[in-house]
Amino acid sequence: MNPQSSIRNPQYRGRIAPSPTGHLHLGHARTFWIAQQRARERNGLLILRNEDLDRARFKPEFVQAMYDDLRWFGFDWQEGPDCGGPFAPYDQSERMALYRATLQKLIAGGFVYPCTCSRKDIQAAVTAPHAADDEAIYPGTCRQNRKSEIVNRKSSWRFRVPDGETVSFTDINLGPQQFIAGRDFGDFVIWRHDDVPAYQLACVTDDAAMQITEVVRGADLLVSTARQLLLYHALRLTPPTFFHCALMTDQHGVRLAKRHAALSLHHLREQGRRPEEIRASW
């Protein structure tokens, strides 16, 4: 750990939150590096959270690869699954009780409803264009559902967005942002039908519980930020500030993804590349 940890400013708490569903690529590395640099510039703390809720794609070998690649690249975190901290556990798979408590608050407040629609049902019903992040805008088919009426049917939980309401925030990097609920994004899933919390709920729950003060992530999550701000409001929580980074693309202008194996940190490390050289190219 960093020998200067005794003089860190605990009022700034940043985080990196990789998901062990494949090898981390250069896009992850650049965004995470910006997060680390912003924490260091403010003498703050950097928290590592292992977002391992995707049961279908999660593989244990990717967890060890995640640690190896991050350390090789030069990352240094002060709280995380491997070193503990005041808000442990830092593996999302071990935080289910917190997520269920958040879900119950939203149910009690009347902010969510059970949805029995399959992905195929939604695709067949959707007439509006997709949202800015390519998620179809839900047509509201199940908005009047009551849980007691669908006890024998598999269902998810959706957050009911306030149609027509403008969600605004100022991104530290990209400036003022504005999205209209019901037009730019629709009712979104917060709890999946396989009894797993969706990204939006898990992210808000953890960032609030871990007292994260600034979230650094990719620009592809700008609309997710608008959704999450609605959750913060519904839960009466103070949101962090946001810094969204431009996305890294390959030579064809395609956004990097975990399928870009040749640009993974694992592959670059095996090739003998040096992190300093890679960062210099940015």
Image (cartoon, helix red, strand yellow):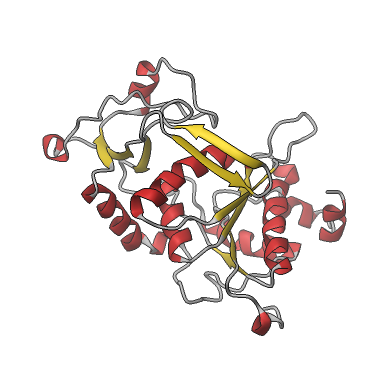
Q: Is residue 47 above or below residue 8?
A: above
Q: What residue is drawn where x is 70% and y is 78%?
A: 2
| The image quarter in which residue 279 lies | bottom right
Instruction: Say whether residue 132 is left or right of residue 155.
Output: right
Q: Nearer the viewer, residue 141 or 54?
A: 141
Please indicate, yes or no, whether residue 195 appears anywhere in the rendered image.
yes
Q: Nearer the viewer, residue 94 or 165?
A: 165
- Number of numbered discs visible in the structure rendering: 0
Q: Is residue 36 above or below residue 235?
A: below
Q: What residue is drawn where x is 86% and y is 49%?
A: 281
Q: Is residue 96 above or below residue 152?
A: below
Residue 109 placement (x, y as % from top left): 24, 48
Q: Nearer the viewer, residue 55 or 246?
A: 246
Instruction: Say whether residue 278 is left or right of residue 212.
Output: right
Residue 12 placement (x, y as % from top left): 60, 68
Quadrant of the frame with the N terminus: bottom right
Q: Nearer the viewer, residue 89 or 161?
A: 161
Q: What residue is drawn where x is 36% and y is 55%?
A: 236
| The image quarter in which residue 230 lies | top left
Residue 234 placement (x, y as % from top left): 34, 49
Q: What residue is drawn where x is 81% and y is 59%?
A: 275
Please indicate, yes or no, whether residue 258 appears anywhere in the rendered image.
no
Residue 276 placement (x, y as % from top left): 85, 60
Instruction: Say whether residue 83 is left or right of residue 271.
Output: left
